[in-house]
Image (tube, rainbow, N blue to C red):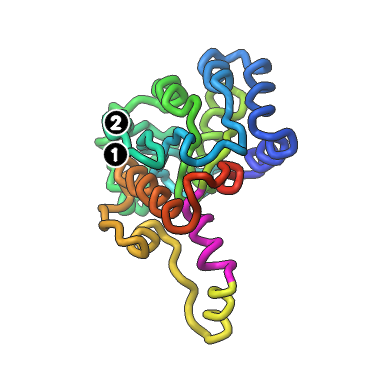
């Protein structure tokens, strides 16, 4: 997490579009050069004009320095349409063994990963899917640091990018708002901002959790609902990303 945080602060200082421009000139890796060369949207871009990519990962744990990615699901979308025809899903072989506790969460077993590719084999396809789009996740402390750590381990350089975090948007409304403070004063428990509970507040259907592709789709639908209820199609991208 520390290296990802340092890189994120560097990108925030320069601005994401400037960071992408600089990294496109610095990297010697073809897939990263193409990704960064596609550029980053201006933060003033209205959300109605933002192409996005919902992303979810299942991992062997929560610490990117000790755990690894076992599956990735992505779904391209915008505020008007979810493009299921462009969805992608991979099971990848982690460099560290699975443990029984992680298997009970994501249900990916030793036999599933036995013939699975290493992340490096699917990385060019993933980067192509990400190029020119804003990544949307539910809890940014998984996808961004895990992917950054995995790319650093394989390519020797970082992969940093802005994200819209649907959990952070729910936290704005239910954890740091005046309503949340009133709940605390009354001794009421905090509102859950987990993916399924967040979706329920918008009347969205319940999906089977802990499957990367299902959760990516669930995240895309949640962001559409959040923008529709709490923001607007004209909201600048910079108000939602981090």
Q: Return the x and y of residue 121 as percentages of the image width and height.
A: 40, 21
Q: Which residue is mark 2?
A: 114
Name the residue tied to disc 1. Answer: 110
* Magenta stretch holds residue 229: no
Q: Residue furthest right?
A: 13
Task: Considering the whole magenta stretch, tell me its main secondary structure.
Answer: helix
Q: Quadrant of residue 181?
A: bottom right
Judged left or right of residue 3, residue 219 is left
Q: Position of residue 23 (x, y in %)?
A: 65, 22
Which residues lie in the magenta part?
Answer: 165-177
Q: Nearer the viewer, residue 117 or 223?
A: 223
Secondary structure under tag 2 reads: helix
Residue at the spot 47% in from the left edge and 24% down from the top edge: 127
Q: Is residue 178 above or below residue 82?
A: below
Cα separation between marks 1 and 2:
6 Å
- Residue 224 screen position, x and y as percent: 40, 48
Task: Please name whichever residue, 91 or 143, is drawn nearer the observer in this view of the structure.
Answer: 143
The image shows a total of numbered marks equal to 2
Query: Label 2 near label 1: C-beta < 8 Å?
Result: yes
Query: Residue 118, how many percent across, how many down?
Result: 40, 26
Q: Is residue 175 magenta?
A: yes
């Amino acid at each position: 997490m520390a290296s990802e945080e340092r890189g994120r602060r560097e990108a925030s200082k320069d601005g994401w579009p400037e960071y992408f421009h600089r990294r496109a000139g610095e990297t010697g890796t073809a897939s990263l050069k193409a990704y960064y060369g596609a550029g980053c949207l201006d933060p003033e871009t209205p959300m109605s004009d933002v192409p996005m990519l919902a992303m979810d990962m299942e991992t062997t744990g929560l610490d990117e320095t000790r755990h690894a990615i076992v599956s990735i699901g992505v779904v391209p979308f915008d505020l008007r349409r979810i493009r299921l025809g462009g969805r992608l899903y991979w099971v990848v072989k982690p460099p560290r063994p699975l443990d029984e506790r992680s298997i009970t969460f994501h249900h990916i077993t030793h036999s599933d990963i036995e013939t699975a590719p290493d992340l490096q084999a699917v990385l060019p396809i993933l980067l192509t899917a990400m190029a020119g789009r804003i990544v949307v996740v539910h809890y940014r402390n998984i996808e961004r640091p895990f992917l950054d750590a995995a790319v650093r381990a394989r390519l020797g350089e970082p992969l940093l990018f802005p994200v819209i975090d649907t959990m952070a948007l729910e936290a704005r409304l239910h954890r740091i708002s005046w309503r949340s403070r009133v709940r605390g004063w009354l001794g009421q428990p905090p509102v859950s901002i987990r993916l399924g509970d967040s979706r329920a507040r918008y009347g969205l259907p319940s999906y089977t959790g802990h499957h990367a592709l299902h959760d990516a789709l669930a995240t895309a639908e949640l962001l559409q609902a959040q923008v529709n209820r709490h923001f607007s199609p004209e909201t600048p991208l910079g108000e939602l990303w981090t």
